[in-house]
Image (cartoon, rainbow, N blue to C red):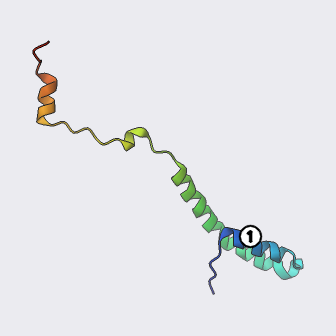
Amino acid sequence: MIFNVTTEEANVLIAGLAELPFKTAAGLISKLQFQAAPQLAEEAAAAQVAATPVPEAANEAPQVQTAESANAESVPTQGE
């Protein structure tokens, strides 16, 4: 059986189980924590990637030099 719950809902379930006698709930709490650990690590990694700022240079469009712009840079104008 597979259940899909949010992190908050899982915490409520674990808190409720913690109210039961230790020998009744300890195995299930451990099993839930074991299954949740890789998912929480994945969520944390995704959040870290999303929070990483992109350098400004990566946001700019690459400069493309056309024949006209190359000539404009190398040909002096009348005022020079």
Position of 4 with respect to 60 (left or right) is right
User: Which residue is rendered at x = 19% and y = 36% of the image?
Assistant: 65
Q: Residue furthest front?
A: 79
Q: Quadrant where the N terminus lies?
A: bottom right
Q: Provide residue 76's location: percent of width, then percent of height.
A: 12, 18
Query: Quick check: 29 above or below 78?
Result: below
User: Measured from the top left, where is residue 77 in percent x and y?
Assistant: 11, 18
Q: Seen in the image, is 12 located left or right of residue 79?
A: right
Q: Position of residue 74 (x, y in %)?
A: 13, 23
Q: Which residue lies at the image location 44% right of the left edge and 41% below the top edge?
A: 55
Image height of 52 relative to 67, above or below: below
At label 1, counting other C-alpha atoms closer than 10 Å, the crowd grade (few under 14, some 14-19, many 20 or more) is some
Q: Determine the image quadrant of residue 16.
A: bottom right
Task: Decide if residue 67 is on the left or right side of residue 20.
Answer: left
From the image, tell me which residue sits under label 1.
Answer: 11
Query: Vertically, is 78 above or below 25?
Result: above
Secondary element under disc 1, as helix, strand or loop, is helix
Amino acid type indicated by mark 1 = Asn
- Counting the numbered discs, the total is 1
> Residue drawn at (71%, 73%), measured in percent from left and top?
10
* Most foreground residue, 37 or 79: 79
- Image quarter where the C terminus lies is top left
38 and 76: which is toward the camera: 76
